[in-house]
Image (cartoon, helix red, strand yellow):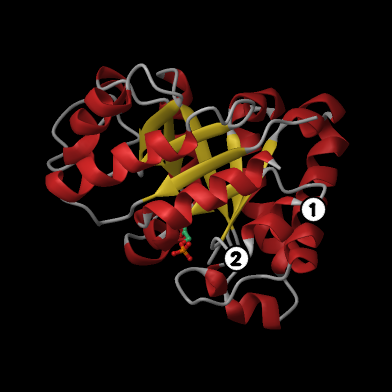
């Protein structure tokens, strides 16, 4: 049995005062929830705050992006080593917002995945299709290509030290969740594609679902055989919602 993981993606939200309340509520509300992984991916300026509140708790923290470069003249960028300096465990790579708004292509995403792993971070690799791609029935092709670029660069075994997140773009921030069966179909496809390379890696790999996961739909999504938890946007900013989602992963 793969342990479930619930990851909050705060995106560009937060402030020191509200973060303090939110983090404290999450720690208190998830206390004793053993056997699952919990993490929050916060904006860079709040990594230090997350570290000081969450160290010595069962909740880990991470970032939402990183540079593919180690260091150098890259104004505004943040390296993997800087993230480990603040105790990050995870870093999201290839989120659809990065792909769509900041032009990150599959190759750049693969380089970021590599930079993260090289530094000892666990990349949370996001893949998923747009509404047009789903309508054109090319969902499997799109996610396969997103995945293959990373496998080609890193090798199949590298996936064992990562987390995948299937996030259909049309379900992100729209309130339009994929049905559990729609999500399961793609998760199953992803896992079987990986199994063709390595059954061991496929069996162990956590594949999260993301896209309008809320307190009232998390349980049915997490009940599907190939869904190993969630990557949560909007609902991760609301303590009660997020805690309920974490509890749903436990059941
Ligand atoms: P929402 O949960 O707000 O739809 O966002 C999902 C997401 O993009 C998580 O990375």
Query: Where does label 2 land, which residue?
Result: 216
Up-down relation of residue 165 to residue 179 (above or below): above
Q: Quadrant of the N terminus?
A: top right
Quadrant of the rendered image containing residue 235: bottom left
At horizontal 19% and vertical 50% (from top left) the residue drawn is 18
Say whether residue 141 is left or right of residue 133.
right
Horizontal and vertical percent for residue 158?
63, 25
Quadrant of the rendered image containing residue 45: top left
Q: Residues within 10 Å of mark 2 (few under 14, many from 20)?
A: few
Horizontal and vertical percent for residue 130?
57, 73
State whether residue 35 appears in this view: yes
Q: Residues within 10 Å of mark 1 (few under 14, many from 20)?
A: some
Label 1: element kind: loop
State whether residue 43 appears in this view: no
Q: Nearer the viewer, residue 195 or 171?
A: 171
At horizontal 59% and vertical 44% (from top left) the residue drawn is 247
Q: Quadrant of the C terminus?
A: top right
Label 2: element kind: loop
Query: Where does label 1 land, which residue?
Result: 224
Up-down relation of residue 44 to residue 120 (above or below): below
Quadrant of the rendered image containing residue 56: top left
At horizontal 55% and vertical 60% (from top left) the residue drawn is 215
* Cα gap from disc 1 to disc 2, whole angstroms: 15 Å
């Amino acid at each position: 049995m793969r342990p479930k993981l619930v990851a909050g993606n705060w995106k560009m939200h937060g402030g020191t005062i509200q973060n303090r309340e939110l983090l404290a509520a999450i720690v208190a509300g998830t206390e004793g929830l053993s056997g699952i992984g919990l993490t929050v991916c916060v904006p860079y300026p709040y990594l230090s705050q997350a570290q000081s509140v969450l160290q010595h708790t069962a909740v880990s923290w991470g970032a939402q992006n990183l540079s593919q470069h180690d260091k150098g003249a890259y104004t505004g960028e943040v390296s993997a080593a800087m993230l480990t300096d603040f105790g990050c465990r995870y870093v999201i790579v290839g989120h659809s917002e990065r792909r769509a708004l900041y032009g990150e292509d599959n190759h750049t995403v693969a380089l970021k995945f590599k930079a993260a792993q090289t530094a000892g971070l666990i990349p949370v690799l996001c893949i998923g299709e747009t509404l047009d791609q789903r309508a054109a029935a090319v969902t499997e092709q799109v996610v396969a290509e997103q995945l293959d670029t990373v496998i080609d660069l890193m090798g199949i075994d590298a996936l064992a030290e990562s987390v995948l997140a299937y996030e259909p773009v049309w379900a992100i921030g729209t309130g339009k969740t994929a049905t559990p069966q729609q999500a399961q179909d793609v998760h199953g496809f992803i896992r079987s594609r990986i199994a063709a390379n390595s059954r061991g890696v496929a069996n162990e790999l956590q594949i999260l679902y993301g896209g309008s996961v809320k307190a009232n739909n998390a349980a049915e999504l997490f009940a599907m055989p190939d869904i190993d938890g969630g990557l949560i946007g909007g609902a991760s900013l609301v303590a009660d919602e997020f805690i309920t989602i974490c509890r749903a992963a436990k059941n």
